[in-house]
Image: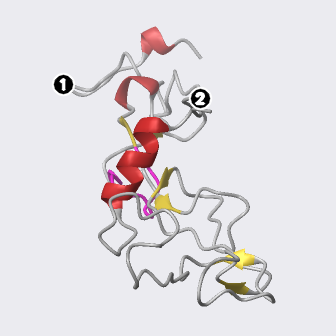
Amino acid sequence: MDNDLCEYPPNYPNNTLDCDGNCINDADGDGVCDEDEVPGCTNASATNYNPAATDDDGSCIIPGCTDADAENYNADATQDDGTCQFLITGTQGCTYGDATNYDAEADLDDGSCEFDCSGGGNCAYDTDGNGLIGSADLLVFLSIYGQPCAD
Protein backbone atom coordinates (compact mmCIF):
# COMPACT_ATOMS: atom_id res chain seq x y z
CA MET A 1 0.00 0.00 0.00
CA ASP A 2 1.32 3.48 -0.86
CA ASN A 3 0.96 5.57 2.30
CA ASP A 4 1.40 8.75 0.27
CA LEU A 5 -2.08 8.19 -1.16
CA CYS A 6 -3.77 8.02 2.25
CA GLU A 7 -6.28 10.71 3.09
CA TYR A 8 -5.91 11.87 6.70
CA PRO A 9 -8.12 14.18 8.75
CA PRO A 10 -6.69 17.66 9.48
CA ASN A 11 -3.73 17.64 11.98
CA TYR A 12 -3.44 13.83 11.71
CA PRO A 13 0.17 12.66 12.17
CA ASN A 14 0.46 11.10 8.73
CA ASN A 15 4.25 11.02 8.96
CA THR A 16 4.25 8.32 11.68
CA LEU A 17 1.24 6.12 10.82
CA ASP A 18 0.20 4.13 7.75
CA CYS A 19 -3.25 4.33 6.19
CA ASP A 20 -4.60 1.83 8.72
CA GLY A 21 -3.28 3.82 11.71
CA ASN A 22 -0.33 1.49 12.45
CA CYS A 23 3.12 2.84 13.30
CA ILE A 24 5.51 3.11 10.39
CA ASN A 25 8.51 3.25 12.74
CA ASP A 26 8.27 0.96 15.78
CA ALA A 27 11.73 -0.50 16.39
CA ASP A 28 10.81 -2.24 19.66
CA GLY A 29 7.40 -3.50 18.45
CA ASP A 30 5.49 -2.13 21.42
CA GLY A 31 2.81 -0.39 19.37
CA VAL A 32 4.12 3.07 20.24
CA CYS A 33 5.63 4.90 17.30
CA ASP A 34 9.32 5.65 17.77
CA GLU A 35 8.58 9.34 17.37
CA ASP A 36 6.10 9.18 20.27
CA GLU A 37 8.19 7.10 22.71
CA VAL A 38 8.73 8.62 26.18
CA PRO A 39 12.01 7.46 27.72
CA GLY A 40 12.10 6.77 31.46
CA CYS A 41 11.75 4.10 34.13
CA THR A 42 8.92 1.68 33.37
CA ASN A 43 9.35 -0.59 36.43
CA ALA A 44 6.57 0.13 38.95
CA SER A 45 8.78 -1.20 41.78
CA ALA A 46 11.37 1.53 41.24
CA THR A 47 11.49 4.72 43.30
CA ASN A 48 11.70 6.77 40.11
CA TYR A 49 8.95 4.96 38.19
CA ASN A 50 7.45 7.12 35.45
CA PRO A 51 3.92 5.98 34.48
CA ALA A 52 4.12 8.11 31.32
CA ALA A 53 7.28 6.33 30.13
CA THR A 54 6.82 3.98 27.17
CA ASP A 55 10.48 3.08 26.60
CA ASP A 56 12.62 1.89 29.51
CA ASP A 57 15.92 3.79 29.41
CA GLY A 58 17.70 1.81 32.15
CA SER A 59 17.40 4.60 34.72
CA CYS A 60 15.27 2.69 37.24
CA ILE A 61 16.38 2.92 40.87
CA ILE A 62 15.36 -0.05 43.00
CA PRO A 63 16.81 0.06 46.52
CA GLY A 64 17.73 -3.19 48.23
CA CYS A 65 20.60 -5.50 49.07
CA THR A 66 22.95 -5.85 46.10
CA ASP A 67 25.48 -8.21 47.74
CA ALA A 68 24.95 -11.70 46.29
CA ASP A 69 26.48 -13.25 49.44
CA ALA A 70 23.80 -11.77 51.72
CA GLU A 71 20.78 -13.71 52.93
CA ASN A 72 18.41 -11.02 51.67
CA TYR A 73 20.07 -10.41 48.29
CA ASN A 74 17.69 -8.74 45.83
CA ALA A 75 18.59 -9.51 42.21
CA ASP A 76 16.31 -6.68 41.05
CA ALA A 77 17.98 -4.05 43.25
CA THR A 78 20.02 -1.43 41.41
CA GLN A 79 21.12 0.61 44.43
CA ASP A 80 22.41 -0.82 47.71
CA ASP A 81 20.43 0.57 50.63
CA GLY A 82 22.57 -0.87 53.45
CA THR A 83 20.09 -3.54 54.50
CA CYS A 84 22.17 -6.61 53.60
CA GLN A 85 22.06 -9.34 56.22
CA PHE A 86 24.67 -12.06 56.48
CA LEU A 87 24.42 -15.41 58.15
CA ILE A 88 26.95 -15.53 60.96
CA THR A 89 28.40 -18.97 61.49
CA GLY A 90 30.49 -19.88 64.48
CA THR A 91 30.52 -18.85 68.11
CA GLN A 92 30.69 -15.16 68.90
CA GLY A 93 32.48 -13.77 71.92
CA CYS A 94 35.71 -12.18 73.06
CA THR A 95 38.66 -13.82 71.33
CA TYR A 96 41.45 -11.69 72.88
CA GLY A 97 43.36 -13.83 75.38
CA ASP A 98 44.33 -10.97 77.73
CA ALA A 99 40.73 -9.81 78.20
CA THR A 100 38.92 -10.51 81.46
CA ASN A 101 36.02 -12.01 79.55
CA TYR A 102 38.05 -14.10 77.09
CA ASP A 103 35.96 -16.92 75.65
CA ALA A 104 38.04 -19.92 74.53
CA GLU A 105 35.01 -21.33 72.70
CA ALA A 106 34.54 -18.19 70.57
CA ASP A 107 35.90 -18.14 67.04
CA LEU A 108 34.28 -14.83 65.97
CA ASP A 109 35.16 -11.69 67.92
CA ASP A 110 32.01 -9.70 68.65
CA GLY A 111 33.73 -6.62 70.08
CA SER A 112 32.72 -7.40 73.67
CA CYS A 113 36.23 -7.79 75.12
CA GLU A 114 36.76 -6.15 78.52
CA PHE A 115 40.06 -5.38 80.20
CA ASP A 116 40.90 -4.83 83.87
CA CYS A 117 42.41 -1.39 83.87
CA SER A 118 42.32 -0.86 87.63
CA GLY A 119 45.43 -0.84 89.72
CA GLY A 120 47.89 1.78 88.56
CA GLY A 121 47.45 1.87 84.81
CA ASN A 122 48.88 -1.60 84.18
CA CYS A 123 46.38 -2.15 81.41
CA ALA A 124 47.34 -3.51 78.02
CA TYR A 125 47.21 -0.73 75.41
CA ASP A 126 46.22 2.02 77.88
CA THR A 127 48.90 4.31 76.43
CA ASP A 128 47.75 7.44 78.28
CA GLY A 129 47.43 5.69 81.68
CA ASN A 130 43.89 6.87 82.41
CA GLY A 131 42.58 3.39 83.20
CA LEU A 132 40.60 3.09 79.99
CA ILE A 133 41.35 1.87 76.49
CA GLY A 134 39.79 4.47 74.25
CA SER A 135 40.17 6.52 71.11
CA ALA A 136 43.03 8.58 72.61
CA ASP A 137 45.01 5.36 73.07
CA LEU A 138 44.29 4.34 69.50
CA LEU A 139 45.49 7.71 68.21
CA VAL A 140 48.78 7.33 70.11
CA PHE A 141 49.19 3.82 68.75
CA LEU A 142 48.47 4.94 65.18
CA SER A 143 50.94 7.82 65.45
CA ILE A 144 53.78 5.42 66.27
CA TYR A 145 52.62 2.50 64.14
CA GLY A 146 55.37 1.30 61.80
CA GLN A 147 58.16 3.10 63.65
CA PRO A 148 61.24 1.08 64.59
CA CYS A 149 61.56 0.13 68.26
CA ALA A 150 64.45 1.59 70.25
CA ASP A 151 66.94 -0.86 71.64
In the rendered view of the protein, which quadrant contains the C terminus? Answer: top right
> Alpha carbon of mark 2 to alpha carbon of mark 1: how far?
89 Å
The residue mark sitting in front, 2 or 1, is 2
The residue drawn where x is 53% and y is 83% is: 112
> Which residue is nearer to you in this view: 78 or 22?
78
The residue where tag 2 is placed is: 148
> Residue 4's image quarter?
top left
Mark 2 and mark 1 lie on one chain; the one further toward the N terminus is 1
Which labelled disc corresponds to residue 10?
Answer: 1
Residue 78 versus residue 100 in the image, above or below: above
Q: Residues within 10 Å of mark 1 (few under 14, many from 20)?
A: few
Q: Residues within 10 Å of mark 2 (few under 14, many from 20)?
A: few
Residue type pointed to by label 2 = Pro
Q: Is residue 36 left or right of residue 104?
A: left
Residue range of the region highlighted in magenta in the rendering: 41-50
Which labelled disc corresponds to residue 130?
Answer: none
> Which residue is nearer to you in this view: 72 or 86?
86
The residue drawn where x is 19% and y is 24% is: 11
Q: Is residue 39 left or right of residue 12?
A: right
Residue type pointed to by label 1 = Pro
Q: Tell me if residue 59 can be seen.
A: no
